Image: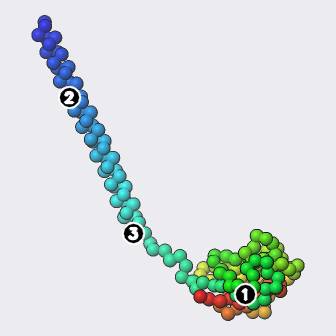
Amino acid sequence: MLDAVVAFIKNIGNIGYLINIAGVILQYLILFFLYLFIYKLAKNIYRDLKSAKKVVVNNTEQLFLKVIVAECLVKNNLDEVVRVDTSLNIGRAENNDIIIASPIVSAEHAIISCVKGKYVITDLDSTNGTLLNDKKVSGSAVVKPGDEISIGPARFIAQGE
């Protein structure tokens, strides 16, 4: 009977040792699959980035406004050249990019924006209108380098790069 108890205790020791080995093997398997997952994820991200289309953000010639009459301008003062990025707000209110302090200019008078690679001036239903090359803009009109824009007493010449 004593021999049976000793054999049982020896087997328990061996089982504990085997359980420790199984635990270590399990930890290495989990670590292996974690690294395999990270590798596959990085490979897929790399493949997606490599095959992504290259996007041309803006191949349009940059437009600038040169101030030629500026006695009423509050912001972007005399003889300054103003760059038109995606849009440029013009009006009497303080939230505009170019502020014209004149009672004949509407609070939000006009906006110049880049639409499908072309610069467009839009009259925002102003009371006295916006002139492009001495013609009243009804709605929107394309602005090209050399064009003259008149808003109230202020006058601008559009220039390219």
- Res 155 seen here: yes
- Mark 1 and mark 2 lie on one chain; the one further toward the N terminus is 2
- Kind of residue at badge 3: Ser
Q: Name the residue under label 1.
A: 79
Q: In which quarter of the image is the N terminus?
A: top left
Residue at point 27%, 37% (across, down): 26
Task: Give the structural element (helix, strand or loop) at label 3.
Answer: helix
Task: Give the structural element (helix, strand or loop) at label 1.
Answer: loop
Q: Where is residue 146 in the image (x, y as percent from the top left)?
A: 67, 93
In the rendered image, the residue lying farthest to the left is 3
Q: Mark 3 points at which residue?
A: 51
In the image, is 51 to the left or to the right of 97?
left
Near mark 2 (Cα within 10 A), the count class, few <14, some 14-19 or many ≥20, is few
Question: Where 86 falls versus 64 (above or below)?
Answer: above
Of badges 1 and 2, nearer the viewer stands 1
Q: How far apart are marks 3 and 2 (CA)?
A: 49 Å
- Mark 3 and mark 2 lie on one chain; the one further toward the N terminus is 2
